[in-house]
Amino acid sequence: MDSKPDFERHFEELISSIMQGPSELPQTDLENHLQDAWESAEAEQHWDHFDEAWEESAPPPPSDQIKGQKSMPLTEFCNMWQTMWPMEELQQGDYIFEPNNPFINNPNSQLIAQESLAHGEINQSILALESVVINNPDLPEIWVLLGKLNAESDEDSRAVAALTHAYNLDSYNLEAILTLGISLINGKQEQNAMEMLIKWIEHNPNYNHLSSSSTEIYDKVLDLYTQASILHPEDHSLFQVIGSLYFMSKDYDLAVSAFTNAVDKDHENYYCWNRLGAALAHSGDNQNAIHAYQRALEIRPQYVRAWANLGIAHANIGNMVEAIRYYLCALSFNNKASHIWNYLFTSFACLSIFYIGRFDLLEKLKAFDPQAFEDEFQYMALRNFPIQQSNEWANEFLFENN
């Protein structure tokens, strides 16, 4: 059994690859190593090992480096990073409200939320809905919407917390049950997710007569939803669940098929377009994944999770600079998403190793301000350009896969 902590093992692999030359280690693999090592070091508080591995892997700065430019020691940077951006740990059922909410005590908060949502302004909608439930916490339908919007904003913990509130208020609310079940899958709480998805079948008059002889809970849930999809093949939500189940079990080709069925039945379902993109990316089809994410963003331009996934897809094909632009764009819509800052950290780390003299990008992260990188990466242009031909691609993709 390997007794070494994960961060040491990841960095030994990283350093070994780098010693063979950069061409031996694709940038996407390097980014994955750095991401894993960063998360392990952050969790275990071993910044000294992280610093040592960094110094060994990074090339020395050139002698003609810009005069007067000083690099922050990595230990100092990592300590600063953790202090300024602690990992958010929520107990299930808790919801942490935004402390500086301009809509608190505004009697028109619900109307503001509706108008903001109509214009696709997710963050403002979340703030307005938070004001609504602070003043009237017994509205399950508002908690459901708040949970769904937090999921779009890549805030899984808050999404689960809001949806749990909705379920506790109304344990027969089918939308709350189904959305919570899927969110629990995304949050890697598989057992709780399976139990919630079974409740949805049991409480749904269209499917509560179904049964399964499977003894394993995952197989039972998959069997029930497969039976339901045969009974009502027009119900896209069933294929959304089936796709999520296959994705959870890493059967990515089957997940692609299920999510394709879902978007074929509901062409405007940006959530399923995004999930289809994720399944395509995990199955190795990054080009079609990019198109699927673009389709999701054409429908929902402020969909933070899709922007972040576009960054990951570009990193997977070695386009690190473009990946950084998409991460920055995601952060411009939600600068509280700590995991996206971590994606950005590892991407900048890759640039620092492969392109000498760019350690300055890491130091600029301490401001936690995406705008600090606009002059160099011009990510705001991504928000303004129409996403071309995604609708045409979507129609062709669905035609080819049906």
Image (cartoon, helix red, strand yellow):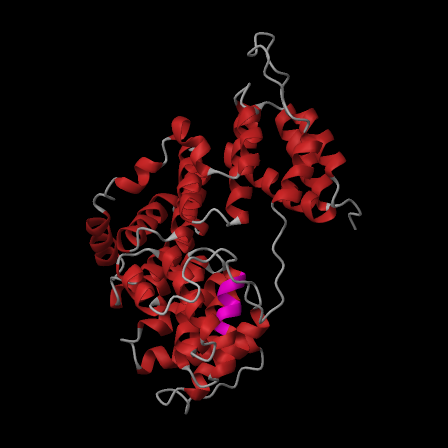
Whether the magenta-drawn stretch holds residue 307 is answered as: no
**Residue at image location 39% in from the left, 76% down from the top:** 141
212, above or below 90, in the image: below
Whether residue 156 can be seen here:
yes
- State the image coordinates of residue 304 (x, y, percent, origin top left): 40, 51
* Range covered by the magenta-colored residues: 157-163
- State the image coordinates of residue 177 (x, y, percent, origin top left): 45, 78
- State the image coordinates of residue 130 (x, y, percent, origin top left): 45, 66
**Residue at image location 25% in from the left, 53% down from the top:** 397
Left or right, 333 with respect to 91, comes to left
Left or right, 8 with respect to 308, comes to right
The rendered magenta stretch, by its main secondary structure, is classed as: helix
**Residue at image location 52% in from the left, 86% down from the top:** 213
**Residue at image location 33% in from the left, 79% down from the top:** 230
- State the image coordinates of residue 155 (x, y, percent, origin top left): 49, 58
Query: In terms of depth relative to the viewer, which is nearer, 108 or 78?
Result: 108
* Quadrant in the picture for residue 78: top right
Whether the magenta-drawn stretch holds residue 161 is answered as: yes
* Quadrant in the picture for residue 131: bottom left
66, above or below 333, in the image: above
The furthest residue to the bottom: 209
Left or right, 337 with respect to 243, comes to right
Left or right, 87 with respect to 372, comes to right
